[in-house]
Amino acid sequence: MNAPDRYERFVVPEGTKKVSYERDTKIVNAASFTIEREDHTIGNIVRMQLHRDPNVLFAGYKLPHPLQYKIIVRIHTTSQSSPTQAYSQAISDLDKELEYLKQAFEDEKNRREQRQELP
Amino acid sequence: MDRPAAGASYQRFPRVRIRELRDDYAKFELRDTDASMANALRRVMIAEVPTVAIDLVEIEVNSSVLNDEFIAHRLGLIPLTSAAAMQMRFSRDCDACDGDGSCEYCSVEFHLAARAESDQTLEVTSNDLRSNDPKVCPVDQARAYQQALSGSDFDPNTGDQRGILIVKLRRGQELRLRAIARKGIGKDHAKWSPAATVTFMYEPDIRINEELMETLTLDEKRSWVESSPTKVFAIDPITEQVRVADAEEYTYDDEVIKKAEAMGKPGLVEINAKEDSFIFTVETTGAITAYELIMNAITVLRQKLDAVRLQDDDGDLGELDAHLGGP
């Protein structure tokens, strides 16, 4: 009856930004990114990718509440980098990894088909 | 501590080996990446790869024993061929129509009309659905059509040719309806999920301490091998040595380790999960092929990552400007 629409789980409401960030007022090079309508799928891969960056001192994400469809990613970096830079780098590294993975799948499938054509 | 300058890439280069690939089943190894990536792919395959499913049903006549909502729900759960779903539009952001399903970009119309005339019970199945788009139809119909094309005669071993049962009608009962199928994702409703099962496991690394194993008698070896609930180990009938029969049968149950300790032989076997090596099993409903499911999952995940990229006008840049321009 008064249940919220199911699509509210993954459609960003009008007038809301997908990603917004707020810098920490007390610590330099620390910031929290709020990502709307995302969950553990994005949160966890971004966090793990940030951990690969030696300039990142801390990276974590949380899903504050199961009915609030957003995640908060917190990043703390050294002075050599910045949270926005580390975040953007992590996203492009993940994107390139997936591009590579897609190609790897296509190549593997072609190799298999060639193997099967041979007697 | 020496740290590289910011802006360096920490990209990984995963390796893939496909073990088995059929239309609705795939088994493959994924290496040189971590559990977060494996789990993201699994989650996307289950809940975010789009398919087409019946979403809106207009019932004209229904004198069957099932009520209208019941039938509408059953229609929704029928898997429809969705190879074109990635190129379709979601009806909510389709601008060619007002989302009422009257447009070719976001919807497919189905008709069903059945009436039991004889004394025999009439089974209304997914084969009675008539689609107005040949690309989108119930998966059984598509399979029967393909078999007819390839010239192979009716083969009862390839599966059930009767389609998916919707409702049974008694003499005089009738069902007539119009249904609209739309693109959607499993996150919205499970009927849109193309995945029957998607699982992954860590590849186990099993090392038997051969020296310690040789101190066991054949009977002790047998009882140790049998302590595993799955057939991971076996005894070579000729050499009477214990060997790993199938490492992937291991369910990380620790039974063999406990058994070794109980026998007073701790360290008889060492089993570790390889943290960067996964074995995936993917099964689909037939809406798309297993290979399409994997490829679409990668595409969808890339689109999601693209959507969470920082835009120029994000965050507190106003404050940053104040810092830069300040006294």
Image (spheres, coloured by chain):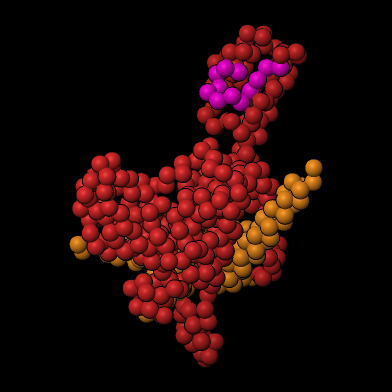
Q: Is residue B278 visible?
A: no
Q: Residue at x 33, y 58 (%)?
A: B112
Residue stretch rendered in magenta on the structure: B225-236
Does the magenta run of residues contain B261? no
On screen, B320 above or below B39?
Answer: below
Residue A27 place in picture, x, y as percent: 49, 69
Does the magenta run of residues contain B228? yes
B244 or B216, nearer to the observer: B244
Q: Residue at x 67, y 55 (%)?
A: A105
Residue B246 place in picture, x, y as percent: 64, 29
Q: Is residue B239 visible?
A: yes
Q: Residue furthest right?
A: A119
Left or right of B248 on screen, residue A15? left
B52 or B13, nearer to the observer: B52
- The chain that appears red in the image is B
Residue A48 place in picture, x, y as percent: 56, 56
* Chain A visual colour: orange
B186 or A20, nearer to the observer: B186
